[in-house]
Image (spheres, rainbow, N blue to C red):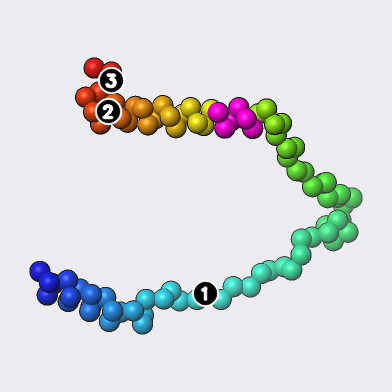
Amino acid sequence: MKRLVLACLLLGLAFVESAPAQAVPYQRPVETAPQPDTIGGGYKTPAVQKPLPRDYWLQVMCCCWLRQCVFQSGWCWRGAAGNGWWR
């Protein structure tokens, strides 16, 4: 068994040189996004949209909900691993 493991390790080390992936040459087709004057037709770029931050109470509620879900999943797993609380 030891000889088999040693042979597999030596065989694996033999191919270490050829293991790295071949690099694929890549070029970006453009450097920047098209501007409204380049697009033409009276196009105007929309303003950047950013999501509003969550309220503090909503963050607290999400943390409590996550804590409760983790607790219940552990409780169910413990019941499933033991004699089972649902039987």
Name which of mark 1 and mark 2 comes first in the sequence: 1
User: What quarter of the picture does the N terminus occupy?
Assistant: bottom left
Q: Residue at x 26, y 75 (%)?
A: 12
Which mark is drawn over residue 5?
Answer: none
Amino acid type at circle 3 is Trp
Q: Which residues are magenta?
A: 59-64
Amino acid type at circle 2 is Ala
Q: What residue would you read off at disc 2?
A: 80
3D distance between C-alphas at marks 2 and 3? 7 Å
- Label 1 crowd (10 A; few <14 / some 14-19 / many >=20): few
Q: Is 20 displayed left or right of 11 in the figure?
A: right
Q: Is 44 displayed left or right of 62 in the figure?
A: right
Q: What residue would you read off at disc 3?
A: 85
Q: Residue at x 43, y 29 (%)?
A: 71
In the image, residue 79 above or below residue 51? above
Residue 62 position in % (x across, y down): 58, 30
Name which of mark 3 and mark 1 comes first in the sequence: 1
Q: Residue at x 27, y 82 (%)?
A: 14
Q: Main secondary structure of the magenta part?
A: helix
Instruction: Tell which of 24 and 43 is nearer to you.
Output: 24
Amino acid type at circle 1 is Val
3D distance between C-alphas at marks 1 and 2? 50 Å
- Label 3 crowd (10 A; few <14 / some 14-19 / many >=20): few
Q: What residue would you read off at disc 1?
A: 24
Of marks 3 and 1, the one in the foreground:
3
